[in-house]
Amino acid sequence: MIRFVVCAILVFSAVPQASGQPSVSEDLYRGMRWRNIGPFRGGRVLAVAGSPGESRVYYFGAAAGGVWKTEDAGLNWSPLWNHTSVSAIGSLAVAPSDPNILYAGTGEALRGDISGGDGIYKSIDAGRTWKNMGLGDTRAISRVIVDPHDPKVVFLAALGHPFGKNSERGIFRSMDGGATWQKALYRDDHTGGVDVAFDPNDSRILFAALWEANRTPYSMTSGGPGSGLYRSADRGTTWQRLEGHGLPKGILGRIGVSVSAADSHRVYAVIEADENALYRSDDGGANWQMVNRDGHWVRPWYFNTVYADPKDANTVYMLNLGIYRSSDGGQKFTALLGTHGDHHALWIDPMDPRRMIDGNDGGANVTYDTGRSWTASDNQPTAQFYHVSTDNRFPYYVYGAQQDNTSVGIASRSDTGIIDERSWTPVGGGECGFIVADPRDPNFVIAGAQNGLFTRFDRRTGQAQIISPMADNARSHAAIDNPHRFQWTSPIAISAAEPDALYIAGEVLFKSLDNGMSWKIISPDLTRNDKAKQVSSGGVLTPDDSSSEYYDTIFALAPSPLDKDLIWAGSDDGLVHITRDGGKNWTNVTPKQMPEWSLVSMIDASPFDAGTAYMAIDRHRLDDDHPHIYKTTDFGKTWSEAVHGLPANNYVHVVRQDPKRKGLLYAGTDNGVFVSFDDGSRWQSLQLNLPSVPVYDLTVHGADLIAATHGRAFWILDDIAPLRELNESIAASAVYLYKPETALRVRVMGGGGGIGSRGNVGHNPPNGAMIDYYLKAAPT
């Protein structure tokens, strides 16, 4: 069977472009389409909501995957947020008095792999369309609430810039449905709002929590003088800071608060302090008692949320690694059955508390029996991947590590016409890091994880052998106390010029010629090795050393595909080195114009010219969202910046070269994919139908471009031959037929040609030959 696939006209403009204009009109290649291969396995969810009058309708907001809706009680989910300017959702609320009105607060609060928001959005048609309602510089909105009786009265808690100071933070109020906002409660430019709650029986009364917290590339700090619990009795016009009367003394960290609808005098607050604990007030917040400190709750800066049951004042829920419920006012908790660990958000139906939706690190799940059973999350393609690679099989497999889950090796197509759970499997390693299949034998896969863990997976036996050069697990230790410093996503590479050579990187570069059975250090410390930036993280209240804060490490690694002795290395503290003799000698080739302490996110060594390389530089953890790409053609002696055409506040994760056409480049940014047809002189969108989502990595396999998104799983742009063929002569042709890629006859047991009849699965490419052409004029 031949399948003709029409791409829109693709031409180079023969007329010189004005400054800032793309070299190729985006209208001319919009006929190409990305396809989602999955896996359909949920990612981190921070926000959930339901409709009190519609028992089958729920919403969730993914950490970097937008807003989703179900109208069949969680059996199927539909995206509502494909093409907004940001994809990170920190909070959601449905107006209790009008289910058509929704508010979505964008941006995640304080993790290392977060994406920023651009304010508060509103929908008046149950999520079909959205409008940005302002507060663009809040960056991270942790909670939004709507008055139970008046949908025009809205409050939100905004943390502000997680990686820097700014003034648009705290508790905000709107009395006109989001048209205007007032700063209702503000402390200073490094303290933000983290929670806000109405008294469900009297919306003039509110409780709010401020949180002094921030991150740097090498630390996370929770707690300070700015943190505190507040109460207002006049709709947020004035606020009283609650201190003493049973509340903990000293420095406070993250606080969660909830008021019982069954009894307005009952208020619960979970407070990070010298001793993280649950506090209860029985008189509307005047006096408090510690009711539970039994250690259910770890990493309070990451969780610390509490939810009062709307019908029973003594029933209360706490979220942390698990979901916990108390029926005696918080004195004793029992764990509920959950579908995944790490729980962030809970919505309880105010009319029927048996009905809830939970947001966790594995997706969103619905219950109708108070948590005894939950819907699955294998219908949510919101996986967050860090990197992507492929192997040499047919069909080829795509590899990546999913945050908060396992590694994945997933088929790029299947014999059944769909890509479902039969088409993928874990391949060792863990939730983060690089994965590389052995080019000599795809049965073997090298995978990484946090804390310096590396494995070699044997597909034939299903076993993963640990091959780490550092014996001890680094978790819970400060970086300075470890023999080596391995980052959350420590690089792994196999040299295309020397397939026996396996490399991994900490602060030094390790090489193995025997599949990781032994390692040799082939570099000095290639970082700044600033000991002051290697101390324990977390702040004065809760130490937290997960390795995402480990600093002074090699973050990017690129062996040359042309020269086995040429290796590029870039650090997270802003240094670039090169060796041209296999590691015997290293030269610092850091661009002089690159700002200090920049993270070298990715280096791509040229397949055409050994002296050419491209670098993606990421400075968002320094509160700088601008794009930075550098290029060298002389082994790093000189560098030029290549960012013309990229949006001003869209930082770059990766830049890749097309292996067939010199000068054809692809860039993955925190909001999508871009392409350059002229070696980086100008960039333009290659988004097409790809949702707005962070793209952490890209790779080219044959004629396919594969994207690792950090919020919407894996996507493939099949057959990029038209992009490779673009030239000025096409513009003069009345008809043009692009040279088709080699087509292979494949077996499809399910019949049909691709998508199949099942939902919630990845898509196959069309069967048969893909033939691309264009007509200069539309035929009549």
Image (cartoon, rainbow, N blue to C red):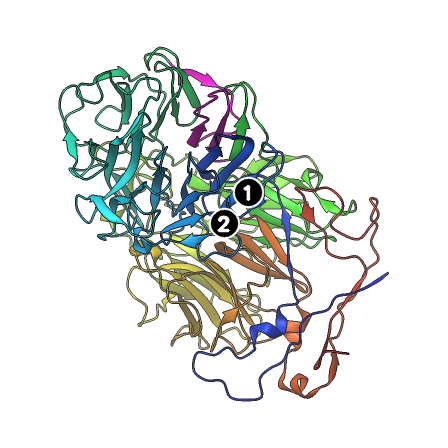
Left or right of 100 on screen, residue 273: left
Residue at 17% x, 35% y is 239
Q: Mark 1 falls on what kind of element?
A: loop
Tell me: residue 257, above or below residue 589: above
Q: Which span is picked out in magenta?
A: 333-361
* Residue 9 placement (x, y as % from top left): 66, 76
- The quadrant in which residue 318 appears is top left
Amino acid at dot 1: Met
Q: Position of residue 301 (x, y in %)?
A: 31, 34
Left or right placement of residue 220 versus residue 700 in this view: left
Q: Nearer the viewer, residue 121 or 600?
A: 121
Residue 203 in the figure: left or right of residue 519: left
Above or below 89: residue 602: below
Residue 213's disc is none
Tell me the residue that label 1 is attached to.
517
Quadrant housing residue 687 = bottom right
Towards the viewer: 235 or 214: 235
Q: Residues within 10 Å of mark 1 (few under 14, many from 20)?
A: few
Q: From the top left corner, tell me how far across and down residue 567 is, in percent.
A: 48, 63
